[in-house]
């Protein structure tokens, strides 16, 4: 599968794409509304940031408890459950007078459910598409996430000029309902990939087996740490550029979109393997130039070029799937997603701490240096993860009682 027309000719992919776009649009508009409401009620910048960006931290809990649900439940059922929980959570936010603590608990619960079954969405791509379609499909989904985030935040900002946060929550609820309906009616039910029931024991057993394999371990660390640190650089755009920070975010989004399109659509599997190392180093290197305190235009160029490097995650995920058995793909990709989101949240906080004690441009370049150092240190481990040296991880079930 090499073209977008071939990709969107697959009915189930179209429906999965629409459901994902509706869910992201609902998330961004409701996050903006919740942040606005939290700031108005509490006056706390910390609580406002937590309400808007703290939800991915629930993925840490998900990764160590019921992440195996992504494989133990039929995928359509798993994704529909997550969509319905998100629908109920967003509908709850429309209630006036609800305490902020309850609102934060609701978003964390929604994020937790999403974290344990979210991997089913990405592993489903392999089931509904012909062999070799994963990278193009994942890059297309990545691009749609960026576009819908920009559109969601932009539209949400405009809506809050005319509407109350509760009315914006109501609009987001409609989008959540669209996502749930499209998921249930637009996807064909399939059997669960794993025979075992979802449990903390299975989750931890598979996690340990994945982490014990040095190839998988190297891939996870490369997918989490360097890019997470670069997101820390991006977290300083607002203190760096003030009210013009939107130009930097837009430039970064354009660079990410460009990388995903080029790598996902135009490169052959062999070319994707060759571009992994250049893209990994492209990600942190431009941000080192922030040490020179570039003006806005040059900073935009640097952010655009660096963000192309995020596309290294596409072939790395492809290697990860090649290395792991199909009956664990949901958990494999869920762990990758949860770890990535957690790393981004942690390193964004670290960047903020550094920017409180250093000039912002120096904090950006220091975080970039840490990302480059992580990239260098983790390069050797990728030798054990290349497809030519692939060793499929064996997921061992526990022995029956009495044996």
Image (cartoon, grey):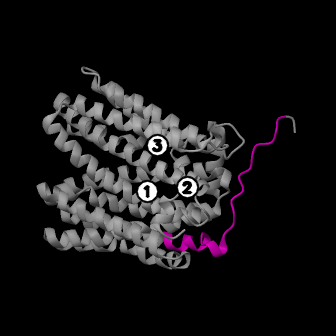
Which of pointers 1 and 3 indicates the residue nearer the eye?
1
Q: Earlier in the sequence, mark 3 or mark 2?
A: 3
Instruction: Where is residue 382? Give x, y as percent.
Output: 55, 71
On screen, residue 277 versus residue 345, left or right, reads right
Which residue is identified by label 1? 141
Residues at circles 1 and 3 in contact by the CB criterion of under 8 Å: no
Q: Are marks 1 and 2 in contact (CB under 8 Å)?
A: yes
Give the spatial CA distance, label 1 vs label 3: 20 Å
Of callouts 1 and 2, the N-terminal one? 2
188 or 201: nearer the viewer? 188
Marks 3/2: CA–CA distance:
21 Å
x then y, percent, for residue 131: 62, 64
Q: Quadrant where the N terminus lies?
A: bottom right
Residue corresponding to mark 3: 59
Task: Tally the numbered discs.
Answer: 3
Q: Is 398 inside the magenta-drawn segment?
A: yes
* Quarter location, residue 365: bottom left
Magenta-colored span: 378-401
Q: Is residue 273 left or right of residue 302?
A: right
Give the x, y percent position of residue 56: 40, 44
Instruction: Give me the C-alpha separation between circle 1 and circle 2.
Output: 10 Å
Q: Residue at x 13, y 38 (%)?
A: 161
Residue 125, labelled with which disc? 2
Q: Is residue 182 above or below residue 7?
A: above
- The label shown at residue 350 is none
Query: Residue at coordinates 42% horizontally, 34% vertically from top-left?
Result: 86
Q: Residues within 10 Å of mark 3 (few under 14, many from 20)?
A: many
Residue 364: say if magenta: no
Q: Does dot 1 land on a helix, a strand or a loop?
A: helix
């Amino acid at each position: 599968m090499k073209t977008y027309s071939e990709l969107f000719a697959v009915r189930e992919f179209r429906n999965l794409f629409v459901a994902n776009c509706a869910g992201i649009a609902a998330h961004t508009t409701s996050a903006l509304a919740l942040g606005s409401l939290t700031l108005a009620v509490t006056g706390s910048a910390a609580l406002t940031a937590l309400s808007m960006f703290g939800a991915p931290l629930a993925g840490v809990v998900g990764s160590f408890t019921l992440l195996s649900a992504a494989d133990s439940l039929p995928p359509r059922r798993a994704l529909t459950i997550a969509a319905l929980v998100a629908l109920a959570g967003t509908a709850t936010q429309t209630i006036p007078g609800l305490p902020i603590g309850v609102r934060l608990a609701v978003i964390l619960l929604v994020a937790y459910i999403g974290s344990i079954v979210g991997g089913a969405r990405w592993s489903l791509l392999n089931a509904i598409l012909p062999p070799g379609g994963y990278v193009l499909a994942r890059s297309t989904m990545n691009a749609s996430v960026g576009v819908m985030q920009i559109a969601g935040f932009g539209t949400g900002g405009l809506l809050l000029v005319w509407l109350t946060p509760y009315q914006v929550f109501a609009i987001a609820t409609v989008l959540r309902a669209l996502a749930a309906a499209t998921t249930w009616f637009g996807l064909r039910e399939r059997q669960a990939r794993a025979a075992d029931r979802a449990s903390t024991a299975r989750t931890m057993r598979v996690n340990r087996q994945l982490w014990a394999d040095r190839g998988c371990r190297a891939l996870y660390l490369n997918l989490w740490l360097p890019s997470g640190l670069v997101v820390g650089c991006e977290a300083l755009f607002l203190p760096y550029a003030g009210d013009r920070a939107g130009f930097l975010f837009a430039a970064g989004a354009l660079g990410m979109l460009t990388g995903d399109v080029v790598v996902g659509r135009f490169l052959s599997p062999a070319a994707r393997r060759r571009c992994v190392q250049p893209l990994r180093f492209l990600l942190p290197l431009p941000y080192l130039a922030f040490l020179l305190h570039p003006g806005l235009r040059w900073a935009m160029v640097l952010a655009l070029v660096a963000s192309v490097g995020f596309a290294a995650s596409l072939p790395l995920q492809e290697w990860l799937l090649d290395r792991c058995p199909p009956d664990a793909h949901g958990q494999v990709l869920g762990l990758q997603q949860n770890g990535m989101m957690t790393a981004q949240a942690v390193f964004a906080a670290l960047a903020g701490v550094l920017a409180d004690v250093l000039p912002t441009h120096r904090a950006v370049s220091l975080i970039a240096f840490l990302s480059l150092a992580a990239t260098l240190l983790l390069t050797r481990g990728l030798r054990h993860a290349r497809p030519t040296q692939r060793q499929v991880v064996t997921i061992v079930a526990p022995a029956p009682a009495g044996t």
